[in-house]
Image (cartoon, rainbow, N blue to C red):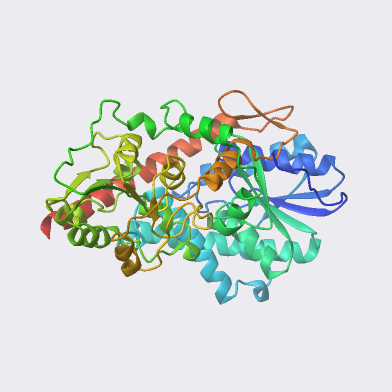
Amino acid sequence: MAPPCEPPSQQKVIVHTAYPLWRKQALLTMARAKELQDQGNEVTLTYCNSKAGTCAANYAGSPIACWICRNRVKSTAAALGIQAIPLETGTEAGPSNLAPSMSEKKKLAEGVQSGITSTFRTFIRDSNASRVISRIKRRYFCTSSRLLQSLKNLALKKKPDRIEVFNGRHACSRLALITAESLQIPFNTLEGTTRQKPIIFRGHTPHDRIAIQKRMMQHAADPQVADSYYRQRRQPKNNKFARKHALDFAPPRAEHFQRKASIFLSSQDEFESLGKAWVSPFLNYAPIVYEACLQNPETLFCIRFHPNQADISSDVITPFQKTAALPNTCVYYPTDNANTYTLIEWSDLVITFGSTVTVEACWMQKPVIQLGPSFFDQLDVSYNPTTCQEFLELLTKDLPPKDRQNAARVANFEEYDFDPFRYVEFNGKTMVAKDLKIARPWSSQLARTTDDLFCNAIKSWTGFWSKRKRDAA
């Protein structure tokens, strides 16, 4: 658990409610605002006042969803005694001289694309080719731009000491960070940990991999904690992806090969959604993997798709057909029976594209080559080439495993790093409110479910046309 390091009380703090329709996000935002107010701070809760806006929780632009969203914030804030100020998205947004600058528009557009990529599970090139998704992106950008203009106007008037918001990746929440940067106001971002605990990132976002790894390195390298953590990750009840692992899986026989290597792919759309700071020279997996297998015929390569890739609308399978035809490869597609941990144990060398397998394999004392940026690329738990040529050269060497110490720090971070919230508790399964009530839970869930159905229909349609184009080619 992170030590308390709150700034002095009686500060002016704007807390922006970026995702009122989402249960966890709304809970942490409201709970944080209430706690800040209890500490003596002057808290202003901001929210979108759009009547038919488009955002990460309402891609359909439903007026009903907007009504539920607005009233959820207003009712909850009123019950908590917190001042809530609506951010206008019409002509009331503010004077034209507060309109977003070109650099701010680019950051906002990146936030829009982040949400689109995550929701529709499509690569940027495919979402740009879809007329329906392109229209949604334009509406989302328009709504976010007006909100940004309105928030900047309010911040100039209020002169807050700090701005806080959940996550900061989508345009809905990124606009708060853009405002903070534009007006040189300190900011914090809120998140939930993998252990369903609240956590505060002071001065950076949850996807700032450099800052996150610095925080990881502050933890003790406790081998007992690490051993327990990594053993638990192998259990289906603790790891949703482990539920898809075949317990009776047997790796291929390799008596005719000098070495065994496993390549673990990641969900490319997840990395694309994180923005420019996560751009990788290894994002186009297929030709990189093909060249590695082609140049090392004495090595048997098992190529393991991530189970999460099964839901990607863009085509991730066809590019690997040429690789699958090589005599020294065995490809396990997203829905194939396989077991990640059995493959790690079987391997002499593990190759990842930035997934948690990086630290898991390091802890299992396997040499790991990691391709591209990740939350582990500064921890010295793997060999990190920066070009394809460096990667191919590493494959020719007998690499020893890296020290496990920092993999143990990652485990300690995952297990124990969080910030307790007075109004949030863990019920054994998830985060729930404590002595606090968030208004309209059922109507909010209905609005979210309705939008999910809308998004799934578009995703299916996009995937259908992507497949038709692929088959025609």
Q: Position of residue 123 (x, y in %)?
A: 34, 58
Q: Position of residue 305 (x, y in %)?
A: 29, 45
Q: Is residue 294 above or below residue 248?
A: below
Quadrant location of the C terminus in the rendered image: bottom left
Quick one: which residue is furthest to the top in this view? 428
Residue at the location (42% across, 40% down)?
452
Q: Nearer the viewer, residue 97 or 347?
A: 347
Quadrant location of the N terminus in the rendered image: top right
Q: Nearer the viewer, residue 290 or 142?
A: 290
Q: Position of residue 388 (x, y in %)?
A: 32, 67
- For residue 2, side relative to residue 383 (left or right): right
- For residue 255, side relative to residue 67 (left or right): left
Q: Is residue 195 visible?
A: no
Q: Is residue 259 above or below residue 231?
A: below
Residue at the location (76% across, 66% down)?
156
**Total numbered labels placed on residues in the image:** 0
Q: Position of residue 106 (x, y in %)?
A: 51, 70
Q: Quadrant of residue 455?
A: top left
Q: Is residue 303 visible?
A: yes
